[in-house]
Each structure stands twice: as structure tokens, then as C-alpha cells.
Image: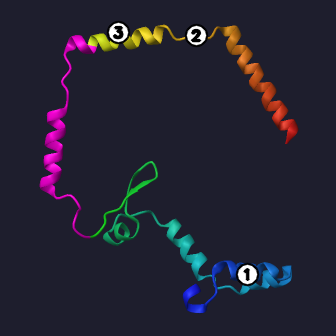
């Protein structure tokens, strides 16, 4: 928009804010409603993984993440990728059962030496949390 009209969005927004409330309502009424109706229609439609959808939005892979493929040649060739995987497998260290048991015992000892709260201490923390929350709510 700024290249075609010479005005950026901030300038247009600043102009709209300067309008009186009646003029702002009139402006909202007169704005085209096509974009809002298209957005609501798109939100109502279930997400179908068509080729067009994948090109536009990518592929959802869970936890709000989307995998997008970039057109063009990959930076790392398939042969290089296989070589990297092979080197990784070679470098993988095999641990003996004795070493695994020793590590397990060390971790168990660390866990057993961790301090444990008594019921009285835990209740004290809960009461302190309640007091902090009530003070914070009173402050707000």
C-alpha cells in the first residue's frame, strides 16, 4: 500500500483516529466487508491438506508447529546427509551394562540426597502463597 499510494498504514491509522466518533462509525460502516466474510468462511472450513493448502500454509506437525518446504535444490545433498548419519552412528558410544548401572546408582544417590519438605513446611509455603495472592489482589 505504501508504494502504490505513498502513505503507510500508520499514517492512515493516525488519520482515522483523528476522526470524530460519528465519522469513525460511518467509516467502519462504509468499509468493504468482503475481507471479513472471507476470513470467517476460511475459519469455518475444516483444514484439508490439498496441494494448494500445503503450498500456502505448510503442513501442520503438531503443537502449533508447521513444516514448510522451500522450493529449490536442498543445501545438503542426499549423499552428504547419509554420510552425516553414518558418522553419527559410528560415533555413538555403546555403554556397557556395568556403566549404565553405575550411572543409575549415582543418579539414585543424588535423588535420595535431595531435601524433602515436611508437611508443615509445605503448608507454610501454601499459606505464604495465599497471603501474597491476597496482597497482590488488594494492590490491583
Which residue is at a point 19% across and 31% down the rendered structure image? 92
Viewer-closest of 35 and 76 = 76
Which region shows up in magenta? 72-100
Determine whether 104 is above or below 50 in the image. above
Would you say the magenta stretch is mainly helix, strand or loop? helix
What is the secondary structure assignment of the residue under circle 3? helix
Residue that mark 1 sits on: 28
Residue 67 percent coordinates (x, y): 36, 57
Identify the mark nearer the N-term, 1 or 2: 1
Residue that mark 3 sits on: 105
Residue 72 percent coordinates (x, y): 25, 70
Cα distance between the residues tagged 3 and 2: 19 Å
For residue 116, the mark is 2
What is the secondary structure assignment of the residue under circle 2? loop
Viewer-closest of 98 and 136 = 98
Which residue is at a point 58% across and 82% down the rendered structure image? 34
Q: Tell me if residue 89 can be seen.
A: yes
Amino acid at each position: 500500500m505504501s508504494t502504490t499510494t505513498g502513505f503507510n498504514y500508520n499514517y492512515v491509522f493516525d488519520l482515522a483516529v483523528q476522526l470524530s466518533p460519528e465519522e469513525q462509525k460511518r467509516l467502519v460502516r462504509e468499509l468493504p466487508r468482503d475481507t471479513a466474510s472471507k476470513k470467517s468462511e476460511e475459519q469455518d472450513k475444516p483444514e484439508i491438506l490439498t496441494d494448494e493448502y500445503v503450498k500456502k500454509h505448510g503442513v501442520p506437525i503438531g503443537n502449533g508447529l508447521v513444516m514448510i518446504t522451500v522450493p529449490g535444490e536442498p543445501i545438503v545433498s542426499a549423499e552428504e546427509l547419509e554420510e552425516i548419519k553414518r558418522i553419527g552412528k559410528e560415533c555413538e558410544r555403546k555403554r556397557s551394562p556395568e556403566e549404565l548401572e553405575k550411572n543409575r546408582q549415582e543418579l539414585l544417590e543424588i535423588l535420595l540426597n535431595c531435601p524433602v519438605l515436611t508437611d508443615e513446611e509445605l503448608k507454610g509455603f501454601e499459606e505464604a502463597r495465599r497471603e501474597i495472592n491476597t496482597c497482590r489482589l488488594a494492590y490491583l
